């Protein structure tokens, strides 16, 4: 359950709330002690805060972990008449953090969430202290195009079999089963928000590759990549080495979603990175 006035709803140790911003309500979930350094987690396309569920318990021992459903996703609003451009998504994230009283945060983005994190750092240089990407392709030429189109308007909402086929390239670990909750979160999107958010990521990356944007920002950067990614060529992770001081970690045997496929292996380099760059709360 969420609340609409921005007040917290405590459920199983987590606090969830729905924060009103100019374009619609944004769902936020918080875990861990409020006086610990903040770690913001941003999901990828056709995903939600639920994609972080397995890894969050590994992060809360040392961080205040904040997860946000971007507009159009999860339990946030899904308006048909608002912009889903990445700078606008980043602006909403920044507004939500302001409402929560966050002054500094390390931002972790999965897949296209890394591009949203970059846009946030471009807008709010003082807010973002460091960036960590998990299987975020550096440029569009690293994208592995699907063999066939996912859905048309007439096929929406899709059934479970169609969703599993759509999501199958997001995982590579043998025997991994996509949870029903994740499937339901995709189906809860509208066809418009699904396509508009994906097109927005493409447009942002067409304008300028992420390593070029990051070099100008000068923020500490960690890039984690499942070596068997079926959506972005894992060899492309080396493109981030042009960013001064960037650290790149490849995880053999894992695919596009190592945060779900093997949370402990994903958390290990992330926690080592945040231990160095986290800003303590006064």
Image (cartoon, rainbow, N blue to C red):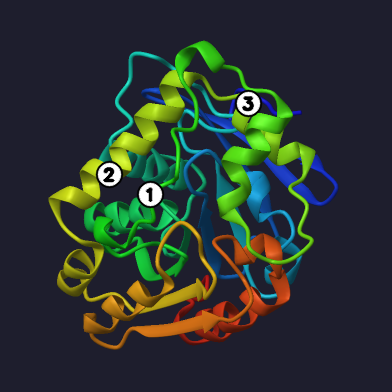
Residue at (65%, 55%) from the top-left corner?
A: 52
Disc 3/disc 2 C-alpha distance (Å): 22 Å
Give how far across and how far down residue 51 sits, in percent: 64, 50
- One can see residue 48 in this view: no
- Residue that extends furthest to the right in the rendered view of this protein: 12
Q: Quadrant of the N terminus?
A: top right
Q: Is residue 119 left or right of residue 249?
A: left
Q: Is residue 115 above or below residue 165?
A: below
Marks 1 and 2, the one that precedes in the sequence: 1
- Name the outermost residue toward the front: 147
Q: Examine the rendered structure and indicate whether residue 247 appears above or below residue 52.
A: below
Gap between marks 3 and 1 measured at Cα? 22 Å
Q: Place residue 88 in its image quadrant.
A: top left
Q: Is 54 rendered above or below residue 268?
A: above
Position of residue 239 in the picture relative to residue 66 (left or right): left
Crowd class of label 3 (few under 14; some 14 to 19; many from 20; radius 10 Å): many
Q: Secondary structure at mark 1?
A: loop
Determine which residue is flagged by label 2.
Answer: 202
* Mark closer to the chain start, 3 or 2: 3
Q: Secondary structure at mark 3?
A: helix
Q: Residue 261: x percent and y percent?
A: 69, 64
Q: Residue at x 55, y 25 (%)?
A: 189
- The residue at 31%/58% (across/down) is 118
Label drawn at residue 205: none
Q: Position of residue 203 (x, y in %)?
A: 22, 42
Task: From the image, tell me which residue sits under label 3.
Answer: 187
Task: Name which of mark 3 and mark 1 comes first in the sequence.
Answer: 1
Seen from the viewer's position, the closer of residues 174 and 42 is 174
The reply to whether dot 3 and dot 1 touch (C-beta < 8 Å) is: no
Residue 145: give its label: 1
Structural distance between the alpha carbons of marks 1 and 2? 12 Å
């Amino acid at each position: 359950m969420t609340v609409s006035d921005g007040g917290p709803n405590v459920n199983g140790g987590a606090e969830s709330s729905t924060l009103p911003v100019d374009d619609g309500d944004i769902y936020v979930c918080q875990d861990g002690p409020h006086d610990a350094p903040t770690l913001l987690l941003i999901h990828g396309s056709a995903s939600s805060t639920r994609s972080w569920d397995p890894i969050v318990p590994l992060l809360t021992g040392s961080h205040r972990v904040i997860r946000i459903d971007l507009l159009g996703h999860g339990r946030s609003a899904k308006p048909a008449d608002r912009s889903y451009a990445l700078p606008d998504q980043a602006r909403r994230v920044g507004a939500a953090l302001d409402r929560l009283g966050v002054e500094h945060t390390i931002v972790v983005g999965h897949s296209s969430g890394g591009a949203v994190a970059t846009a946030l750092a471009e807008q709010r240089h003082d807010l973002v202290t460091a960036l960590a990407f998990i299987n975020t392709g550096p440029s569009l030429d690293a994208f592995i195009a699907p063999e066939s189109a996912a859905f048309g308007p007439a096929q929406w909402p899709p059934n479970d079999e169609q969703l599993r086929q759509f999501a199958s390239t997001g995982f590579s670990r043998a025997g991994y089963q996509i949870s029903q909750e994740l499937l339901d979160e995709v189906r809860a999107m509208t066809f418009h928000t699904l396509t508009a958010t994906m097109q927005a990521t493409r447009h942002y990356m067409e304008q300028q590759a992420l390593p070029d944007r990051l070099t100008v920002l000068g923020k500490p950067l960690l890039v984690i990549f499942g070596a068997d990614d079926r959506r972005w060529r894992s060899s492309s992770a080396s493109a981030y080495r042009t960013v001064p001081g960037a650290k790149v970690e490849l995880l053999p045997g894992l695919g596009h979603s190592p945060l779900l496929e093997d949370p402990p292996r994903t958390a290990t380099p992330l926690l080592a990175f945040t231990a160095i760059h986290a800003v303590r709360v006064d």
